[in-house]
Amino acid sequence: FTEKQLEVLAWPANSPDLNVIENLWAIVKRKIRDRKPTMLDQLKQNIATAWEAVSAETCDKLVKSMPRRLQAVIQAKGAATKY
């Protein structure tokens, strides 16, 4: 990075993942957990169905939770939080 003159952000190794898409994937995984597809096409369909079932309201809540999540990380000095 130094050689390419790229600025690297200070990012603690134990910083929790604050990427909202990870939370969405967790929701999708919970929705398909009990399904047991035996073919790849079935798995793809289960994922697509679960993804489509995630409401805009759920997405909005996740996005609006970011200030609270960031504050929790700051207070924990980069350590794990409840998120």
Image (cartoon, grey):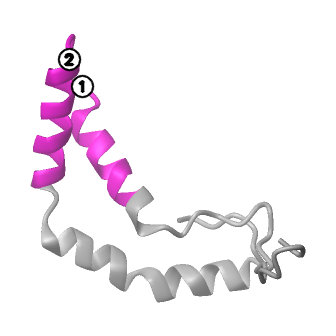
The answer to whether residue 57 of the structure is visible from this angle is yes
Residue 24 counted in the magenta span:
yes
Q: Which mark is residue 71?
A: none
| Circle 1 or circle 2, nearest the eye | 2
Quadrant position of the N terminus in the picture: bottom right
Which residue in the protein does label 1 denote? 34
Residue at 60% x, 87% y: name it: 71
Name above or below for residue 73 compared with residue 16.
below
The quadrant in which residue 33 appears is top left
Q: Is residue 45 left or right of residue 20?
A: left
For label 2, the crowd category at 10 Å Cα-Cα, with few meaning under 14, some 14 to 19 and many 20 or more, is few
For label 1, the crowd category at 10 Å Cα-Cα, with few meaning under 14, some 14 to 19 and many 20 or more, is few
Name the dominant secondary structure of the magenta segment: helix
The span shown in magenta is 23-52
Q: Which mark is residue 37?
A: 2
The percent position of residue 40, horizontal first and vertical second, equals 23, 20
Amino acid under disc 2? Pro
